[in-house]
């Protein structure tokens, strides 16, 4: 036998040992023990039981009390090709959860006196025609501008989200579109409005949304694995792939899932954010003890939209006020490209959950609220 063969194990054994070590390390990352007085881990895990099986897609869960993790765990796999498990450090695309970060960039610029929330957006976006009444930045934030959705406009003009599409191209296409209604008359959720906000950040600061948020928000907060994805070929460490379930009628295929498409669409603002459970704890802490802007920053973030009629909306700066079990909640969900996400705070209880998932059929908001029910049962009975 060759001396080299005697000195080292066969390659397949070596690979198996490495894989076993990786899985062991991943297992350590996948969970933390619940503190005394909290619901047992078994009850929390039962909420995600259908995903905590071999060969399944799944979710990453984070639970915080008073700005500290009380539970975090991954269920299922981030990559089914390589059977890489989901952990709290897995990076997910979080869809419209991104809107609160886009809105926060606008709030920071307003807090610094660099923009006026009530000025005409044409100050920064001359591609839009003059309108009477004018569309203001505040209209964009609260979805009351009347600007149509960017995806709807693209499809109407023969463009697919598969297309490589620059920000300038998108703005030139969106600007002259007919409004869905007069500014301030209605609330209608608009991804076109939030893309416009991203471009206002760029024009007002001289930096792209990605650059501005990285410098002003993510780096100061220690969110080192969070970024706005404005380059579709950018490599993302520990990124989860997204999936969809196969239909019963699919023929000639194997497996329970198929991989959802990886879009060339790289127009951040309405979405475009990659982040992790670990990083979102820093964002939750900032709601409790702001480290970013001045004393007016959080006041701006929580300011709700008001229609021309005087009706006050439940939508503030990329976050929505609601209630669950009689308790006030503030949060936002997200869905795109086979990813689903939910971030919900119970501000009066100092409690928060976030759930990041990699299959389009999963409903993370319901899962996060089920977990909240376990922790806040006593508060909900009052």
Image (spheres, helix red, strand yellow):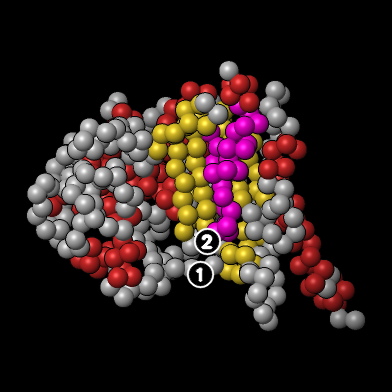
Quarter residue 64 falls in = top right
What residue would you read off at disc 1?
261
Q: Residue at x 39, y 39 (%)?
A: 319
Give the residues drawn in magenta, as a range.
352-376
The residue furthest front is 309
What residue would you read off at disc 2?
338
With 57 as the anchor, is 206 left or right in this view? Answer: left
Local packing at callout 1 (Cα closer than 10 Å; few below 14, some 14-19, many 20+) is few
Most foreground residue, 353 or 307: 307
With 158 as the anchor, is 274 left or right in this view? Answer: right
Question: Eyeballing the image, is 216 above or below 297?
Answer: below
Most foreground residue, 365 or 279: 365
Residue 199 seen anywhere in this rendered image of the structure = no
Most foreground residue, 129 or 308: 308
Is 180 in the magenta? no
Q: Residue at x 56, y 50 (%)?
A: 363
């Amino acid at each position: 036998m060759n001396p080299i063969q005697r000195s080292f194990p066969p390659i397949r054994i070596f690979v198996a040992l490495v894989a076993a070590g990786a899985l062991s390390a991943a297992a350590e990352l996948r969970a933390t023990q619940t503190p005394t007085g909290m619901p047992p881990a078994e009850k929390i895990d039962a909420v995600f039981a259908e995903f905590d099986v071999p060969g399944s897609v799944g979710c990453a869960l984070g639970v915080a009390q008073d700005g500290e993790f009380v539970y975090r765990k991954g269920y299922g796999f981030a990559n089914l090709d390589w059977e890489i498990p989901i952990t709290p450090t897995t990076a997910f695309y979080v869809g419209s959860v991104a809107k609160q970060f886009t809105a926060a960039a606008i709030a920071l610029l307003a807090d610094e006196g660099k923009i006026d929330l009530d000025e005409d957006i044409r100050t920064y976006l001359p591609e839009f025609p003059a309108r009477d009444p004018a569309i203001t930045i505040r209209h964009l934030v609260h979805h009351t501008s009347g600007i149509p959705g960017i995806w709807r406009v693209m499809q109407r003009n023969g463009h697919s989200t598969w297309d490589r599409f620059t920000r300038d191209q998108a703005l030139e296409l969106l600007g002259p579109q007919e409004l869905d209604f007069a500014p301030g008359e209605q609330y209608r959720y608009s991804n076109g409005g939030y893309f416009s906000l991203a471009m206002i950040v760029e024009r007002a600061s001289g930096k792209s949304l990605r650059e501005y948020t990285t410098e002003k928000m993510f780096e100061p907060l220690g969110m080192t694995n969070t970024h706005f994805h404005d380059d579709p070929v950018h490599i993302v460490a520990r990124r989860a792939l997204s999936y969809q379930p196969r239909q019963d009628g699919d023929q000639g295929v194997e497996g329970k899932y198929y991989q959802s498409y990886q879009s060339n669409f790289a127009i951040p603002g309405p979405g475009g954010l990659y982040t992790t459970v670990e990083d979102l704890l820093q964002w939750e802490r900032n709601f409790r003890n702001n480290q970013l802007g001045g004393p007016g920053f959080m006041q701006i973030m929580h300011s709700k939209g008001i229609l021309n009629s005087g009706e006050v909306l439940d939508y503030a700066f990329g976050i929505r006020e609601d209630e669950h079990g009689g308790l006030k909640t503030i949060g936002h969900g997200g869905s795109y490209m086979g990813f689903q996400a939910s971030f919900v705070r119970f501000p009066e209880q100092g409690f928060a959950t976030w759930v990041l998932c990699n299959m389009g059929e999963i409903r993370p908001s319901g899962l996060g609220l089920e977990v909240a029910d376990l922790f806040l049962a006593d508060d909900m009975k009052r």
